[in-house]
């Protein structure tokens, strides 16, 4: 199976309908345990190929690491998060989603995995968030090493929110 490091972005958008919902579930380490047919179609993998694979198999190189750090911090702390994400398909196409990611809990309240529903964002939302993501990636790529890049882009994102006087949730719903 191809892995994400083998895939080069083509710049070709993979279309999906506004009424379609992409659904995946993962274990605690982010390995896919469930993928609906919409996800499989857009990612261009069969369900069998996806099960057990890291969800990052569809991570687009234009996606800032700072956003994923925020996402993982929130869900590992037991909170939901909404985020705009650009994904890459097996053949290099891309598709933007507005993701709602939540932890899944067992009967004792322990986190046992994660669940994500994604919808198609509007073109205007993608335009607004893409510029911010470009800036975050520039910061990440301009640093002396990956760790410093992540720290710098995370600080930039937090400073941007503070400057606008909003929290992350309020910001993401205003895009």
Image: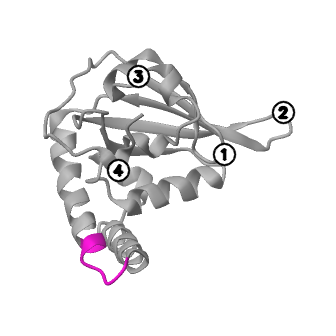
Q: How packed is label 1: few (under 14 Cα within 10 Å), some, or many (20 or more)?
A: some
What residue does disc 2 label? 107
Name the residue that disc number 3 marks.
40
Q: Residue at x 44, y 55 (%)?
A: 68
> Which of 20 and 32 lies nearest the eye of the viewer?
32
Above or below, 148 against 89 in this view is below
Residue that numbered label 1 is attached to: 28
Q: Label 4, label 2: how many angstroms apart (C-alpha)?
A: 38 Å
Total residue callouts = 4
Q: What numbered label is drawn on residue 85?
A: none
Q: Is there a contact, CB below 8 Å, between mark 3 and mark 2?
A: no
- Sort mark 4 into few (<14), some (14-19) or many (20+) by Cα contacts within 10 Å: few
CA gap between label 3 and label 1 equals 21 Å
Q: Are marks 4 and 2 in contact (CB under 8 Å)?
A: no
Disc 4 or 1, which lies upstream in sequence? 4
Measured Cα–Cα span from mark 2 to mark 1: 16 Å
Residue extending farthest to the bottom is: 144
**Residue 165 percent coordinates (x, y):** 35, 66
Q: Left or right: where does residue 129 sit relative to residue 127? A: right
From the top left corner, tell me how far across and down residue 127 is, in percent: 15, 45
Q: Earlier in the sequence, mark 4 or mark 2?
A: 4
Q: Nearer the viewer, mark 2 or mark 1?
A: 1
Quarter that holds the N terminus: top left
Q: Residue furthest right?
A: 108
The magenta stretch spans which residues?
A: 139-145
- Is 35 placed above or below 74 here? above
Which element is circle 4 on? helix
Number of other residues with Cα within 10 Å of mark 3, as a class: few under 14, some 14 to 19, many 20 or more:
some
Mark found first going from the N terminus, 3 or 2: 3
């Amino acid at each position: 199976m191809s892995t994400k490091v083998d895939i080069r972005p083509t710049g070709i958008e993979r279309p999906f309908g506004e009424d379609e919902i992409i659904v995946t579930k993962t274990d605690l380490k982010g390995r896919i345990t469930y993928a609906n047919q919409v996800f499989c179609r857009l990612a261009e993998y069969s369900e069998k190929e996806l099960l057990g694979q890291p969800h990052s198999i569809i991570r687009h190189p234009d996606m800032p690491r700072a956003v994923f750090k925020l996402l993982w911090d929130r869900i590992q702390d037991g909170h939901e998060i909404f985020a705009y994400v650009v994904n890459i398909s097996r053949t290099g196409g891309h598709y933007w989603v507005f993701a709602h990611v939540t932890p899944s809990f067992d009967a004792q309240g322990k986190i046992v995995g994660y669940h994500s529903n994604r919808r198609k964002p509007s073109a205007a939302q993608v335009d607004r968030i893409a510029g911010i993501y470009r800036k975050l990636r520039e910061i990440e790529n301009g640093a002396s090493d990956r760790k410093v890049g992540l720290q710098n882009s995370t600080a930039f994102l937090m400073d941007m929110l503070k400057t606008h006087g909003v929290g992350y949730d309020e910001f993401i719903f205003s895009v």
